[in-house]
Structure formats: structure tokens, C-alpha cells
């Protein structure tokens, strides 16, 4: 018995010693790891690869031992879904159109029932997005006003595409019955439906160039349609987060001339609950490797560091503000809003 007790005591001592010396660093590292999930959009859109580019930069800096934040990308229903998932805590970050961020923060439009979400914060803006109307050549759709009576994809419920189109439809006094058919296809389904002659046109609020629009242009005779006119002018005046946008000609087969339309900006959103250090590290991982980041997707190619601070109607997260101040990008001129102290 004494022998067994002695062995047990010795083993217990060495086990305790090993726990003290060897695993403590590993345990500490594990405790310090922050796991964040970034909500994007459909896999054929721009949000998904842009979200992947953000996480790639975060993971790269983690491998360089700069921090211990793990970032993963999730394909979602895009802007409205991402805002709701941020509110419920199902996402840490989400890419959201600048118009949708405003509606969610103020509790207007489709967020009126849920009420204002004053916990929303922004890290930085991304690419400009264009309200892009794509039509079959045989549909006789030359301008936006030609849509009544046509077979139209109005967008996936909860998406920024549908939200923006419905707002513009209100300006025109249109409803779903204005079209001979109103479908709610997801982005991955739109080009196929157009080229299979199941719809005459679809709207995609997206950065360019875009894979789905490229698919439609290369598969069937189609073109981009300008979205202009007095009602559009009134619309962008009413909603200043929709600036006029020009889609360069020659990006897609069948559209040689520049196309004028409007559109919001894509923004990287989070909430006040995201730790300040994590927000700081995500912002730094992207901005400190900015040229490399811009090269990860064509939609980011024309982005400037100054663009990162534009087009937002909600407060910036303190972690992002801290980094932008460090690198001299933050300007206290009233155009940018930081969150209140301690938020």
C-alpha cells in the first residue's frame, strides 16, 4: 500500500509540474483566440469573394503571429440577412449596403417593426455598388421605364437587391403587379433564368465586374440598361447614400458604351459588442496590406484608403477609429462619426 501511495504521489507531483510548465502557453493561447464569422452574400456575387479577401488578410497576419483572431466566411442572403444576424449575435461581421445600414440603425423601412438598432457599428467601407439592370435583347427593354408588363426578377427576399428595387418602385408608384411576372430568384439563379427565357430582366446591386452578369452576357444576347430620368434624380436626392454611378462600357459583351445608374457602397459592419482589439486588428490587417487586398478582387481595384471612411451613416467602431487615427486617415471634420466613449 505504501508503495502504491508513493507512486501515486510522485505521479501526481509530476503531472502538476507538467501542467505548470508545458501546457500553460498553449492554454493561454487558446483562451486568447477570438473566432469571428463574416457574413457575405451569394457565392456568385461580389460580397462572398470580398469577404474571403478580408478573412485572408486577417488569417495572414495571424500566421505572422501578429494576433490570434480566426476569421471564417459564410455565404448568406446578403445585406438585410447580415444586419439581422448581427443583431441576434449569429455573425461577428457582415457586409452590408450603405442604405441598409442606415435603415437598420434608424429602424425604418423593413426594420420599422424591429425598431432602431443603435448597437450597429462600421469598420470601413468597401467598393461602390451599382444598381444594375440586365435585360434580354429581345425583351425590348431599353430604359428602366420599359419594365411594366415584363417578366422581372425582383430579388431574393431580405437582399439588398430587392430592398433597393422596392424603394425605387415606390418612387415610380409601381407594385409587384406592375410586372407580368415577379420572381424572387437568388443571384446564382438569375443568369440561368434570363438565358432560359424564363424572365426578361433582373436587377443586381453589385460591384463590377461581376460573375453572374458576365455569365448572362456570354451565354445569351443581353445588355445593361441605363437607370436615369427625373424620378431617379428625385430618388437619389431623397436618399443621398445612393450616388450616381457609371458602369464602364466594354466590361460585358453586348454593352459597349458606359451605363449610367446609381448605387450604394458596400460596408463592413459589426456591433458595439465586438471587442475593441478585435475591431482594431481586422481593420489593421486589411489597411496595412492595402495594395495586396485590392488585388484580391477586381471590384476592389479602384478603392482608395480615403474611400474606406465614406458612405456611412452609423458610428465607426472605436477599434477602427483607433487604427485610422494611428495612420493619419481619421479627420475630425464632422463627416465621420465615432461611437460614444465606452461603446
Image (cartoon, rainbow, N blue to C red):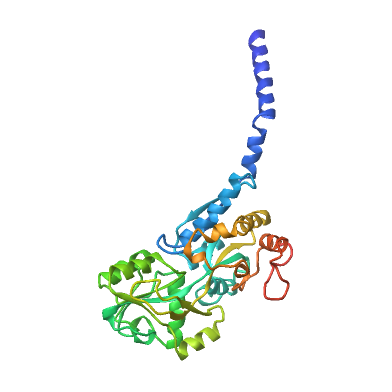
* For residue 36, above or below residue 145: above
Write down the quadrant of residue 205 in the picture. Answer: bottom left
Front residue of this view, candidates 271 and 308: 308
Residue 16 falls left or right of residue 144: right
Front residue of this view, candidates 40 and 308: 308
Residue at 46% x, 71% y is 160
Residue at 61% x, 45% y is 64
Residue at 56% x, 49% y is 59
Residue 72 falls left or right of residue 274: left
Q: How many labels does the image show?
A: 0
Q: Quadrant of the N terminus?
A: top right
Q: Where is residue 114 drawn, in percent x and y?
A: 54, 70
Q: Where is residue 237 drawn, in percent x and y?
A: 55, 86
Q: Where is residue 201 drawn, in percent x and y?
A: 33, 76
Outermost bottom residue: 230
Residue 88 can be seen, yes or no: no
* For residue 194, above or below residue 23: below
Residue 222 can be seen, yes or no: yes
Residue 339 falls left or right of residue 88: right
Q: In which quarter of the image is the C terminus?
A: bottom right
Write down the quadrant of residue 325 in the picture. Answer: bottom right
Amino acid at each position: 500500500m505504501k508503495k502504491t501511495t508513493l507512486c501515486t504521489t510522485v505521479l501526481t507531483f509530476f503531472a502538476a509540474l507538467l501542467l505548470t510548465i508545458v501546457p500553460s502557453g498553449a492554454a493561454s493561447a487558446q483562451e486568447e483566440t477570438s473566432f469571428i464569422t463574416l457574413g457575405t452574400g451569394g457565392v456568385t456575387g461580389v460580397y462572398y469573394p470580398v469577404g474571403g479577401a478580408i478573412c485572408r488578410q486577417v488569417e495572414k497576419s495571424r500566421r505572422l503571429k501578429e494576433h490570434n483572431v480566426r476569421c471564417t466566411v459564410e455565404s448568406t442572403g446578403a445585406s438585410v440577412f447580415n444586419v439581422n444576424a448581427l443583431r441576434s449575435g449569429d455573425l461577428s461581421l457582415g457586409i452590408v449596403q450603405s442604405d441598409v445600414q442606415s435603415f437598420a440603425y434608424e429602424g425604418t423601412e423593413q426594420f420599422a417593426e424591429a425598431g432602431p438598432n443603435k448597437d450597429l457599428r462600421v469598420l470601413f467601407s468597401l467598393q461602390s455598388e451599382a444598381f444594375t439592370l440586365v435585360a434580354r435583347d429581345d425583351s425590348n427593354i431599353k430604359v428602366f421605364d420599359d419594365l411594366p408588363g415584363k417578366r422581372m426578377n425582383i430579388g431574393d427576399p431580405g437582399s439588398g437587391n430587392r430592398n433597393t428595387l422596392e424603394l425605387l418602385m415606390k418612387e415610380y408608384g409601381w407594385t409587384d403587379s406592375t410586372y407580368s411576372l415577379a420572381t424572387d430568384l437568388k443571384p446564382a439563379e438569375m443568369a440561368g433564368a434570363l438565358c432560359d427565357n424564363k424572365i426578361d430582366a433582373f436587377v443586381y446591386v453589385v460591384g463590377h465586374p461581376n460573375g453572374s452578369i458576365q455569365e448572362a452576357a456570354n451565354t445569351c444576347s443581353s445588355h445593361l440598361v441605363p437607370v436615369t430620368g427625373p424620378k431617379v434624380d428625385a430618388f437619389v436626392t431623397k436618399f443621398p447614400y445612393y450616388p450616381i454611378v457609371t458602369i464602364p462600357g466594354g466590361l460585358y459583351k453586348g454593352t459597349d458604351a458606359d451605363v449610367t445608374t446609381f448605387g450604394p457602397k458596400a460596408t463592413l459592419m459589426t456591433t458595439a459588442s465586438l471587442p475593441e482589439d478585435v475591431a482594431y486588428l481586422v481593420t489593421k490587417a486589411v489597411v496595412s496590406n492595402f495594395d495586396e487586398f485590392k488585388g484580391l478582387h477586381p471590384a476592389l481595384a479602384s478603392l482608395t484608403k480615403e474611400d474606406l471612411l465614406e458612405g456611412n451613416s452609423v458610428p465607426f467602431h472605436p477599434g477602427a477609429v483607433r487604427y485610422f487615427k494611428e495612420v493619419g486617415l481619421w479627420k475630425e471634420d464632422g463627416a465621420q462619426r465615432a461611437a460614444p466613449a465606452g461603446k
